[in-house]
Structure formats: structure tokens, C-alpha cells
């Protein structure tokens, strides 16, 4: 609920940075009081009211500081106006989508748009965002701080962008939702493999964006990709909490409603011509989801789709997935040759997925010692405990 609370505060008072602090304090108060007093009937309204009152205090303190510095307090609302607004009934509307587009304002760089939205709307920590960008946490902290200051200095109004501005921001918004979903579906930290709060929120927001731009095939493609991927979630972890690779998943646990909706969305989007990266990734996911079994997957079609995807901007993860798919058609040796070509990318080589893919291909090729070493290298780099346990187990199996 944090994005809805933050959106409500920014819509009423502005002051993005201060509103975020007030939202966090309200969440902390809820964490300490709700276990004892019980969850309120209207949790969102409770959080907005508490955050509004805390924002009142923060803004009053800011006013006092500015007066001490003999500065005209133009950046803050009068305390009386803030106090009056804090007592107003919370809006029934959801301001999260507006907050999403505000964070993707063109006054910010693309990297800052994504980082700020992941924190404000997605609720990710700075460490998690840094991992998504493959940069240190300190670097990401500075980037987010600068983005907040830019929002504050720009005086951006809290409303949906105009039709002419919408296209400019839409690509950044879609990329942000893509990253939020990925963090929810494959968490980069913590004990659990996934965070359903993030993946569900990304799907909800993508549906909301589609209501605005239902004519955009890439919006439909992204929503389809999310649904087709999320459809497999129930089968990805065993009852004991261990990771289950796709080849071993019980496909009867897959969400058939999500698969049907995702296939329909991507089929319709692809018929409009010139498929973008989200449509192509959704098409690949559809091939996986519609296959009766892992062995019956149409890997040739998947390779062909990846090769179309590779005609766009260079994406090392797409190249990695392409190599894995090629190995299913041409054999492990062909996949390993492609991995050798990718090893010049230092960032990719430090990603656990590179070593996990190499381990799998070594094992396919019969090189068990090489596979064990690669599994251990992947486990060492895996940020998630569930995935780390799985990779260590695979290495131990080959001793």
C-alpha cells in the first residue's frame, strides 16, 4: 500500500521527498501498532491519515527552519492549510499510476526515472535497485537522491501527462514495470524466490496503463509477458521451498487462465505488425506455456524469436537465453561457443545466470567437473538464498 499512500500525499501537498519520509514513518507506526491494536477496517485510509499528520509535523519543522534562516517559506504550504488537508477524507481513487508517470518525467534521465519509480512505486530497497542496474548501492543512492531533488525543483504537477507527453514517458514506464515484475518474480535478495506483492503490483499497474493506451501493442505485449511468466509461479518452488527448474515443473499447477489471457493478448498485438521486444518475449513465453511438456517445446521457434529479438538493442541477458535455446536445437557445444563469445562482457560474467547456464551446458556435454565448478561459481554470485541453495545442491550432486 506504500505507493498508494505516497501518491495520495504527493497529490495533496506536493513535496515528494518529504511525503516519502512521512509514508515510511506511517508504515513503521502500522508495523508496531497493528499487531497489538488490530488491523483497521480501512488500512489505506489509516495510513494516509497518519502519514498526513506526520507530513504536517515535517512541513512545520521545515517552515520553522526556513524562518530561522530568514527565508520566505514559498516551498511549503501554510501550516494551517496542511493541518486542514490532513483531516480530509482520503480519496477513494488510486494515485499510484499518476505517481508512476510523474517519476518518469522527461526532466529526469532514463536511469533516474527507473530507479526512482522502483523505489517510490515498486517499494524496492536501494540495494535491490542497484542489483537490477548492476551498480553499487552507494551509486544508486546518489542517483535516487538527485532524482528526488530534480522532482522537487521542477515543480512537476501531480496529474497524468497530456496525450502529447504520454508517448514520451510510456517507454520508461513500461521498462520500470518490467523491472518491478522481474524483481517480484525472481527476487534479488532475501530468503524467498519471489515477492508476489511486487509481481502482482506490476501486473495491476500494467493493466491500468493498458486502459490508457490499449492501442499500443507493446503495452499489451508487456502485460502478456507478465501473465505468461506469472502463470508458472505455483510450480517454481517445491513444498519444501526448493527451486524447481522448468524442465521438472508440474505443468498442471500452471495458471491456465493467465496463460489463455496472455496468449490472446500477444496474438492480437503481433497481428499489428513490427513486434517490439515485449511482444517477442511474450511470444517466447507463450511457446513455453503452450508446450505439453518440456521435451515437446518448440525450441526451433524459440530460437527464431530470439534471433529477431537480437536484431534490436544489445541485451546480454537475451544473448544468454539465446545461447541456452540454441543448445536445445544444435547441442551443448553450439551453446558453449556462444557463451564464450559473451564472456567478454564483464558485467554478464559477474552475473550468476551466466555461470548457471554454462554449468547446465557443461553437464549436457558430459563435462561433469566443469559443470560442478560452474555451479559453484553461480552459487557464489546468486543473490537469492533459494537459488543459492539450488545451485549448491546441483554442484554437490556432481561430486
Image: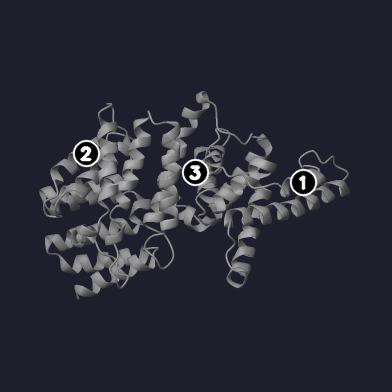
Q: Which residue was labeled with disc 3? A: 114
Position of residue 257 measured from the top left corner of the image (x, y, whole percent): 28, 48
Q: What element carries label 3?
A: helix
Position of residue 226 measured from the top left corner of the image (x, y, whole percent): 34, 46
Q: Which residue was labeled with disc 1? A: 84
113 or 298, which is in the foreground? 298
Asked whether residue 332 appears in the rendered view, the answer is yes
Position of residue 334 measured from the top left corner of the image (x, y, whole percent): 14, 49
What residue sits 28% from the left and 59% below the top? 355
**Given contact means CB atoms under 8 Å apart, are the residues at marks 3 and 1 in contact?**
no
Mark closer to the chain start, 3 or 2? 3
Position of residue 375 measured from the top left corner of the image (x, y, whole percent): 26, 66
Mark closer to the chain start, 2 or 1? 1
Q: Is residue 74 above or below residue 30?
A: above
Q: Which quarter of the picture shows residue 312?
A: top left
CA gap, disc 2 and disc 1 = 57 Å
Does residue 31 appear to the left or right of 327 in the view shown?
right
Q: Which quarter of the picture shows residue 102?
A: top right
CA gap, disc 3 and disc 1 = 34 Å
Looking at this view, name the residue that lies furthest to the top.
Answer: 164
97 or 388, which is in the foreground? 97
- For the C terminus, the image quarter is bottom left
What residue sits 24% from the left and 51% below the top? 339
Mark 3 surroundings within 10 Å by alpha-carbon count, few (fewer than 14), some (14 through 19), many (20 or more): many
Q: Which residue was labeled with disc 2? A: 305
Mark 2 surroundings within 10 Å by alpha-carbon count, few (fewer than 14), some (14 through 19), many (20 or more): some
Q: Is mark 1 on a helix, strand or loop?
A: helix
Q: What element carries label 2?
A: helix
Q: Is residue 1 above or below residue 171?
A: below
Asked whether residue 320 appears in the rendered view, the answer is no
Q: Which quarter of the picture shows residue 310?
A: top left
Mark 1 surroundings within 10 Å by alpha-carbon count, few (fewer than 14), some (14 through 19), many (20 or more): few
Amino acid at each position: 500500500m506504500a505507493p498508494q499512500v505516497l501518491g495520495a500525499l504527493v497529490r495533496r501537498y506536493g513535496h515528494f521527498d518529504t511525503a516519502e519520509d512521512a509514508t515510511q514513518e506511517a508504515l513503521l507506526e502500522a508495523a508496531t501498532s497493528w499487531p497489538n491494536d488490530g488491523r483497521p477496517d480501512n488500512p489505506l485510509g489509516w495510513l494516509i491519515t497518519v502519514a498526513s499528520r506526520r507530513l504536517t509535523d515535517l512541513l512545520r519543522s521545515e517552515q520553522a527552519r526556513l524562518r530561522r534562516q530568514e527565508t520566505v517559506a514559498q516551498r511549503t504550504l501554510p501550516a494551517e492549510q496542511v493541518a486542514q488537508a490532513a483531516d480530509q477524507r482520503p480519496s477513494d481513487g488510486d494515485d499510484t499510476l499518476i505517481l508512476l508517470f510523474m517519476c518518469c518525467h522527461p526532466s529526469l534521465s532514463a536511469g533516474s526515472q527507473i530507479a526512482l519509480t522502483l523505489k517510490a512505486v515498486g517499494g524496492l530497497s536501494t540495494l535491490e535497485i542497484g542489483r537490477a542496474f548492476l551498480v553499487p548501492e552507494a551509486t544508486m543512492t546518489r542517483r535516487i537522491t538527485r532524482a528526488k531533488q530534480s522532482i522537487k525543483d521542477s515543480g512537476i504537477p501531480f496529474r497524468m501527462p497530456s496525450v502529447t507527453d504520454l508517448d514520451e514517458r510510456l517507454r520508461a514506464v513500461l521498462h520500470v514495470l518490467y523491472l518491478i515484475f522481474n524483481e517480484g518474480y525472481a527476487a534479488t535478495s532475501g530468503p524467498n524466490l519471489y515477492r508476489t506483492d511486487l509481481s502482482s503490483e506490476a501486473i495491476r499497474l500494467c493493466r491500468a496503463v493498458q486502459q490508457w493506451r490499449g492501442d499500443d501493442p507493446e503495452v499489451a505485449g508487456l502485460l502478456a509477458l507478465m501473465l505468461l511468466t506469472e502463470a508458472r509461479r505455483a510450480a517454481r518452488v517445491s513444498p519444501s521451498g526448493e527451486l524447481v527448474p522448468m524442465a521438472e515443473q508440474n505443468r498442471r499447477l500452471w495458471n491456465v487462465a493467465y496463460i489463455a489471457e496472455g496468449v490472446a493478448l500477444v496474438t492480437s498485438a503481433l497481428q499489428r505488425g513490427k513486434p517490439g521486444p515485449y511482444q517477442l518475449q511474450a511470444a517466447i513465453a507463450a511457446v513455453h506455456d503452450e508446450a505439453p511438456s518440456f521435451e515437446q517445446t518448440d525450441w526451433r521457434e524459440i530460437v527464431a524469436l530470439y534471433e529477431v529479438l537480437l536484431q534490436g538493442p544489445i541485451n546480454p541477458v537475451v544473448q544468454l537465453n539465446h545461447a541456452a535455446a540454441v543448445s536445445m536445437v544444435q547441442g551443448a557445444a553450439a551453446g558453449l561457443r556462444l557463451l564464450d563469445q559473451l564472456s567478454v562482457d564483464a558485467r554478464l560474467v559477474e552475473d550468476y545466470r551466466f555461470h548457471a547456464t554454462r554449468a547446465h551446458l557443461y553437464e549436457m556435454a558430459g563435462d561433469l567437473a566443469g559443470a560442478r565448478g560452474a555451479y559453484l561459481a553461480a552459487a557464489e554470485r546468486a543473490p537469492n538464498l533459494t537459488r543459492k541453495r539450488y545451485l549448491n545442491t546441483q554442484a554437490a550432486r556432481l561430486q
